Image (spheres, helix red, strand yellow):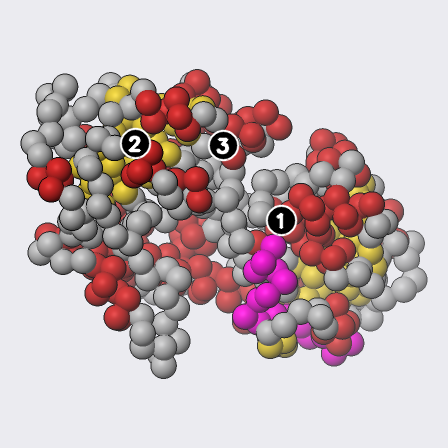
Amino acid sequence: MKISIFGMGYVGCVGAACCAKLGHDVIGVDVSAHKVALINAGRPTIIEKDIEELVRHARSAGHLEATSDAGYAVKHSEISFIAVGTPSSREGHLNLEYIYKVAAQIGEALRDKDAFHIVAVRSTVLPGTNEKIGEIIEEKSGKRRNVAFTVVSNPEFLREGTAVHDYLNPPLTLVGADHEMAVEKMRELYRDIPGEFIATDIKVAEMMKYINNTYHALKIVFGNEVGNICKALDVDSHKVMDIFCRDRQLNISPYYFKPGFAYGGSCLPKDSKALRTLARDYYVDVPVINSIEESNEIQKKNAIRLIMEKGRRKIGILGLSFKAGTDDLRCSPVVDVVEALLGKGFELRIYDKNVKLSEITGTNREFIMAKIPHLQHFVYDDLEKVAAESDVLVVTNKEAEFEQLLEKYPGKIIVDLVRAWKDVDYAGHYEGISWGNINVNPKQGDVLPKDMAGTEF
């Protein structure tokens, strides 16, 4: 099939590469000339596992191209995906400006197209957005919905760091539609994708991403609170939760039920906030959902306090992005920890090879300059340097290169925010954020020398 994808960010770039791998001809559309040039050069616009090879192969095979010309993309495709960003306002409402701009562009392009066209909303939007998109396209095209075109909702369920795998191996494919032929076209598009294909009401499909992500946010916080209680009782919280997760009859996913650090990224904070705002707008009391963000902030404070209690000035942060295998700094809880520690006078060195790469290519530069303008001066791509010049090493994600950290750097103080190791026999001081002492080495009991006075957070 011939498809176009508006927006070459995370969702759009992964979708373009994966659809091309499935044999479809893909036109990527973006207002950024830089992103268009990257795709046309056979290079991805993001850092993500397996994406580089997929884009390079798709481009060389002639299945992928990119343009800034919306009219060209619509004219040469049967389905246009909308995959642009939907940032949230300070109050939690979504900024749909980019969505509506794309809808207008598609509508104008459809004025001169006779063939039936399908618009698929891939971006995360609240119920009612699909209807509004249809109204804009009708106005700009002069054509009627479900006669000359239709709009379906096809939310993505991708995790950054494993997005390519998730796209090609989803638990299900969800399409909300009010046009039977469009459902069959979407079924054909995904025919080689495993998992159940579910066709449902448009508003149901629009709602699902928020319910999923809010529930995932809730699971993370719940696991952390269990972990904090277990730690106070010197109980291994991971053993507790491992047993808890063996009950699969009630559809419990073990993926997020692991005590550790705060959640972050571009989805969980934004989407849970949007759901809370939606409930407030309709005067629905949701105390548990409203408490998620507060509990997540408490977990950040727990991490800061844990680091400060070590009483050492030189801190090495291993991982700055919110998750291993990605360069995404948006809403990364580690950035908040770094900001707090810098404000309290700690001497920081940060290692993150992905973020250092993104600094070179321009990714995340806008975020860095807006959040902590001088942050880039503390980020290194040399793990040896950061480890050698730090007394405390804070592990913030499960990058494979951190697995040998305990063997390579004995005698350091290790603060583990993600349970990087199941068992620990470390000739130094180790402490996890939300589980009891698991270091069996006798040196764990040594008194820690301190080079700075303790302060209350």
* Circle number at residue 353: 3
Residue 171 falls within the magenta-colored stretch: yes
Q: What secondary structure is marked by label 2?
A: loop
Residue under the image location 57 percent in, 60 percent down: 166
Task: Tell me the kind of residue under disc 1.
Answer: Asp
Q: Earlier in the sequence, mark 3 or mark 2?
A: 3
Region in magenta? 164-183
| Left or right of 456, for residue 349 | right
The residue beneath circle 2 is 409
Q: What secondary structure is marked by label 1?
A: loop
Residue contact between numbered discs 3 and 1, judged by CB atoms under 8 Å: no
* Circle number at residue 50: 1
Residue under the image location 25 percent in, 38 percent down: 415
- Residue 420, horizontal then vertical, whole percent: 33, 47
| Left or right of 286, for residue 208 | right
* Circle number at residue 197: none
Task: Tell me the kind of residue under disc 3.
Answer: Lys
User: Spatial distance from mark 3 to mark 2, Cα to Cα?
Assistant: 19 Å
Task: Please rate how many residues cluster around mark 1, counting C-alpha atoms within 10 Å: few if below 14, some from 14 to 19, many from 20.
Answer: some
Observer-side mark, 3 or 2, equals 2
Residue under the image location 86 percent in, 49 percent down: 62
Task: Please rate how many residues cluster around mark 2, counting C-alpha atoms within 10 Å: few if below 14, some from 14 to 19, many from 20.
Answer: some
- Residue 7, horizontal then vertical, whole percent: 68, 46
